[in-house]
Image: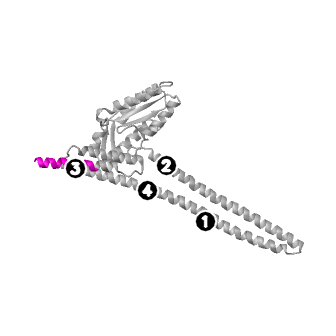
Amino acid sequence: MERLEELRQTLARCYGLALKSSAEYAVELDPRSTEYFRQSLLTLEQQCSQVPTPEQYNAAQASLREVLRNYRDQAREQMAAMRKDLQNAGAAMRVFAESVSVGGDEHELQLRQEVDRLEQIAASEDIEFIRGGIMSSTGTIMRACSELRRSHQVVVTQLQDEIRTLHQAMDHERSQSERDHASGAWSRQKLNERIGSLVRANEPFCVLFVSAKNLRRLERQHAPSVIREALRSLVQQFDGALGGQSMIGRWSETIFGAILEMDPSTAMSLSTEINRKLSMAYPVWTSGIAQMLTIEVSTGIADRRKDSDGPKFYRKLEQMSEAMAGPEHMPAA
């Protein structure tokens, strides 16, 4: 029995180390999706550190397979988007080069023909013939220059459109990288940037925190895809309750924050209402069947009034978020 127990512990330790190594050496294509991938693997590693039963091993293996599949699909989508952007850029430059080359060759041939004609006219002694030839060649050359200018302008316009499209695609990709992959909310970094901007402008505002108190427990009971859909529903409900006018981000693993650019005294009344609207069962559809996940939430507000001390407000933010996270969600020492 001792030997069996030793083997079980060794298996749990090796399985956990394999998960931890997979998280550490993940290929980083997108910072946010990679971070979520690592967090998912570390959560599985923590579950396996307790010498799980065979049933728990099977559940962990199923979760691991889904995490790996999701990350593979995300990487494939990102690579496909990058490849498409490069192909579009290459195609646009090729069209531009070909149009300039073809148009230039045609007009060069036309101009050479007119120069040859002018040389023939110059050898003539007939004044009327010379005058008529010069007027005809001048008109032809002017028309050729106008056509060349128009064709180049069309190509330049097309190139500008392609560049604009590429910029929009890059902005979209950048926006995606600044969001939390699991919930669709903005990243903590984006929240910090906006908070810093408001503090520097000495504007009054507050941060409304929403803590998903039972998220860790739900993560142990459900697959990552189910948790992801539930969190997205929570963020959508949160955004709808605020009228779609506030910036919502993921402050930590279990806490979301919304920046309310209003007087703090007005915002205080929202806390109870948000708590009531978000504490509910969220439907998650898997294989055509709806699972109802009840997310238990608590809310809190950290307010910043005009002319108040900036560092003091930042300390208030950290104290509020740590208090709402509770000991269960505090980072391990």
Q: Which residue is mark 1?
A: 98
The answer to whether marks 1 and 4 mark residues whose Cβ atoms lie closer than 8 Å is no
Graded by Cα atoms within 10 Å as few (under 14), some (14 to 19) or many (20 or more), the crowding at tag 4 reads: few
Q: Residue at 42% x, 55% y: name it.
A: 77
Q: Give me the C-alpha separation between circle 1 and circle 3.
A: 60 Å
Graded by Cα atoms within 10 Å as few (under 14), some (14 to 19) or many (20 or more), the crowding at tag 2 reads: few
Dot 3 amino acid type: Tyr
How many numbered marks does the figure carry? 4
Q: Which residue is mark 3?
A: 57
Q: Which residue is mark 2?
A: 172
Q: Is residue 137 visible?
A: yes
Membership of 6 in magenta stretch? yes
Q: Is residue 288 visible?
A: no
Q: Which residues are magenta?
A: 1-18
Dot 4 amino acid type: Met
Q: Give me the C-alpha separation between circle 3 and circle 2.
A: 39 Å
Q: Give me the C-alpha separation between circle 1 and circle 4.
A: 28 Å
Q: Is residue 110 above or below residue 313?
A: below
Q: Which mark is residue 79?
A: 4
Q: Considering the numbered disc 2 on the image, is that residue within a helix, a strand or a loop?
A: helix
Residue 129's spot in the image, x, y percent? 86, 73
In which quadrant will I find the C terminus?
Answer: top left
Mark 1 / mark 4, whichever is N-terminal:
4
Residue 313's spot in the image, x, y percent? 44, 27
Graded by Cα atoms within 10 Å as few (under 14), some (14 to 19) or many (20 or more), the crowding at tag 3 reads: some
